[in-house]
Image (cartoon, rainbow, N blue to C red):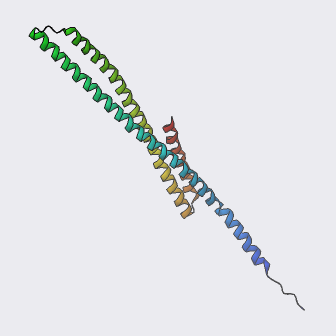
């Protein structure tokens, strides 16, 4: 009786072709992993950008409050000065030296308030600059993710490399936001 011979050469070739194809497509796994990492970095940058945006707003509100307080002290100083002029012009027996001391006190307080208001404004500007750096970072990270997706769809490794380069640029902006 004759043995049935199964042609295994064809199967052997198919197995080798499938193994080669898997090796060729393995880079897609790396694209997916790098894209996930880029998405995490984008989320962190977005969180930090939002934090600094909120802080900039709060510091600007504090500065605005201090400037209002500064103006109130200025108004009190002017009212007190006007009162002193009126009293001195009428020949009143009320001591104007108390009013002059109040005016001097208001002017000293105004100087301190001005310094604090300016500090709040500078802090607000610094937070806003950091926010802008993080916002640039998030935008470039998103572009990097989109390029990586196109790389997978078109099976072009060069696009993945471009995605990685743009992620490095985004990371630079993110680091600048932290500094």
Camera-nearest residue between 14 and 179: 179
Tell me how many marks there are. 0
Quadrant housing residue 85:
top left
Q: Residue 176: x percent and y percent?
A: 50, 37
Nearest the viewer among 169 and 100 is: 100
Q: Quadrant of the N terminus?
A: bottom right
Q: Residue furthest left?
A: 90
Q: Is residue 39 above or below residue 172?
A: below
Front residue of this view, candidates 112 and 92:
92
The residue lying at 59 percent from left, 53 percent from top is 34
Q: List the single residue furthest toward the right.
A: 1
Can you give x and y, in whole percent of width and height, for residue 131 in the image? 43, 40
The residue lying at 20 percent from left, 17 percent from top is 80
User: What's the residue at 26%, 11% (across, down)?
Assistant: 101
Tell whether 90 sits left or right of 60: left
Q: Position of residue 151 (x, y in %)?
A: 55, 59
Q: Is residue 66 left or right of residue 11?
A: left
Give residue 130's position: percent from left, percent from top.
45, 38
Q: Nearer the viewer, residue 101 or 111?
A: 101
* 70 versus 17 height, above or below: above
């Amino acid at each position: 009786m004759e043995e049935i011979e199964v042609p295994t050469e064809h199967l052997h070739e198919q197995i080798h072709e499938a193994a080669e194809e898997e090796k060729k497509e393995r880079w897609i796994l790396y694209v997916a992993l790098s894209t996930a990492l880029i998405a995490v970095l984008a989320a962190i940058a977005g969180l930090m950008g939002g934090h600094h945006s909120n802080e900039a707003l709060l510091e600007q509100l504090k500065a605005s409050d201090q400037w209002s307080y500064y103006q109130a002290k200025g108004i009190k100083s002017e009212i007190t000065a006007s009162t002193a002029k009126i009293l001195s012009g009428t020949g009143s027996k009320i001591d104007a030296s108390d009013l002059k001391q109040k005016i001097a006190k208001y002017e000293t307080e105004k100087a301190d308030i001005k310094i604090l208001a300016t500090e709040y404004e500078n802090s607000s500007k610094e937070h806003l600059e950091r926010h802008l750096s993080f916002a640039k970072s998030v935008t470039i990270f998103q572009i990097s993710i989109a390029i990586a997706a196109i790389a997978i769809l078109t099976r072009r490794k060069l696009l993945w490399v471009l995605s990685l380069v743009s992620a490095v640029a985004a990371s630079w902006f993110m680091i600048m936001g932290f500094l």
